[in-house]
Image: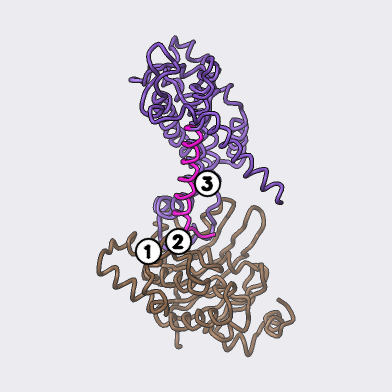
Chain colours: A purple, B brown
Amino acid sequence: MVISLCIVIGSLLIIFGLVIYNGASSLSIEMLTQTPAPGNALGGGILNAILGSLFLALPATGLACLVGIGIALYLQNEFTHAWISGFIRFTLDVLWGIPSIVYGIFCLMIMIYLGMGSSLLVGIIALTLLEIPIITRYMDEAIKMVPLGLKESAYSLGSTKFETAFKVIRKQAFPGILAGVLLGLGRGIGDAASILFTAGFSSRIPTSVFDSTAALPTMIFNLYSLPSGQPKAYAAAFILLLIVLIISILSRILTRRFTKHIIR
Amino acid sequence: MNQPKYQIETKNLSISYDAHNVIKDVNIRIPAKQLTAIIGPSGCGKTTLLKSFNRLLDLREDVKISGKIMVDGIDILGPRLDVPDIRKKMGLLSQKPYPLPMSIYENVAYGLRIHHQKKGEELDRIVEQCLKEVGLWSEVKDRLHEPATGLSVGQQQRLCLARAIAVKPEVVLCDEPTSALDPIAAQQIEKLLLKLKKEYTVVLVTHTLRQAKRVADYVVYMYFGMVIEQGPANEIFNNPKNPETKAYMSGEIG
């Protein structure tokens, strides 16, 4: 037990330690506030990548939520046959397991077919595809876990289906749904493979959805392959870690806040 | 108790899950403003029968119902009925309390908000009155806006009762409401049911014979989905006509 504890906490600390140790020399406020200096990829900051990551992951999460809630509600529908919902759940689980690079080349193929260039838009679509199975399965499970007795209680008070769904089931299922959404967001922000080809790379902040954009993972990849770019790559990795950590902590706090009313 | 009015009447009611017949040709009459106990061994269809009265069985897809359930002279299984309206007339107290995922106050206010659009002080007043009626007010008045899940199971069950009577039902359906409670909490619920029968028709499903003896005015004895005997409590308990009822009363079966 102690060993497993050491492995888990130890690896987290070592990762943080190494990233900070290697990147400390390049960490500065400019990293967060400036875009790369023109003509010199090692100068300036990585603001373009930070914003790029957010511009990619936030809309992708939003879109995935929209698609996810639709599928999840369909799965809960009492008129959906058991074998259809079983098949959809199985498909989602398979999609969840597909490596993100496959989503990347899939979107790349469609992009080329449509004659588009790598852009924020295609990157968002690739991330959306990546996040849909995660978010949908979490939503589905959260709604499925609502006890029958609670639904019966709500209906017995004379609630309509709509009132039961939106006033009672929604409240009960919300922490689980939120956990799924934030997990999807964390995955989207951290993923490199799916956006490597689709979002492209640019040292400017994107001004439209058709612009190429850098993101933190691709920025790290790019910096690391430059001669003497490693310290800056580590600094960028530290910022990425920090963002993911903030999302995790936020999800903890929010989930706890919404869980206090939940019956078990 | 001369010539009681009947609140619920079933006519040739049969219910099956898949191909399994749970309720077989049941004809019962439940008198208004009395406490009717439905007794019988576990798994004989008591809960199914109870849940058919407010159409909760609709939530299951494999259920087939035939026959009639007359409530106030209207067949609630008939077409084009407003199901939420039927359910509004029937409060439910289930085996295990399921408070809504909201505060104590909101649990009681929920039904009032969705049906009567009550607001502000009037809402406060009714919530207080309902909580007083179940003897919970003094225990929760300082933490009305805290989660209902913070209450003990016994308090939660009383909260569920307060929530049910807040929508002014005509009938209170109780599905073994004391089986998850400790003896003291159970006793409180029993006392409340005795109090409630003055205003409401109470239908109590129970598998403890002693509880039925303590509280029932009218008794329906069921066995394997069939009604073996029904009638006023003192008749059924002291002078059962059917040998099977007699066997159950003396503790030979069940």
- Residue drawn at 41 percent across, 21 percent down: A121
Q: In front of the other: label 1 or label 3?
A: 1
Task: Give, as a three-letter code, the residue at label 2.
Answer: Leu
Q: Measuring from the top left, give residue B129's x and y in whole percent.
A: 34, 76
The residues colored magenta run A239-264
Task: Give, as a three-letter code, the residue at label 1.
Answer: Glu
Tell me the subunit letter for badge 1.
B
Q: CA distance from mark 1 to mark 2?
A: 8 Å
**Label 1: which residue?**
B106
- Residue drawn at 46 percent across, 41 percent down: A246
Vertical position of residue A50 compared to residue B225: above or below: above
Secondary element under disc 2, as helix, strand or loop, is loop
Determine contact: label 1, label 2, CB under 8 Å. yes
Q: Nearer the viewer, residue A243 or A263?
A: A243
Residue B235 in sight in this render: yes
Q: In front of the other: label 3 or label 2?
A: 2
Q: Quadrant of residue A14?
A: top right
**Label 3: which residue?**
A78
In this rendering, position of residue B52 left or right of residue A2: left
**Label 2: which residue?**
B100
How dense is the environment of label 2, judged by Cα within 10 Å: few (below 14), some, or many (20 and up)?
many
Q: Sequence order check: which comes first, mark 1 or mark 2?
A: 2
Badge 1 and badge 3 both on one subunit: no
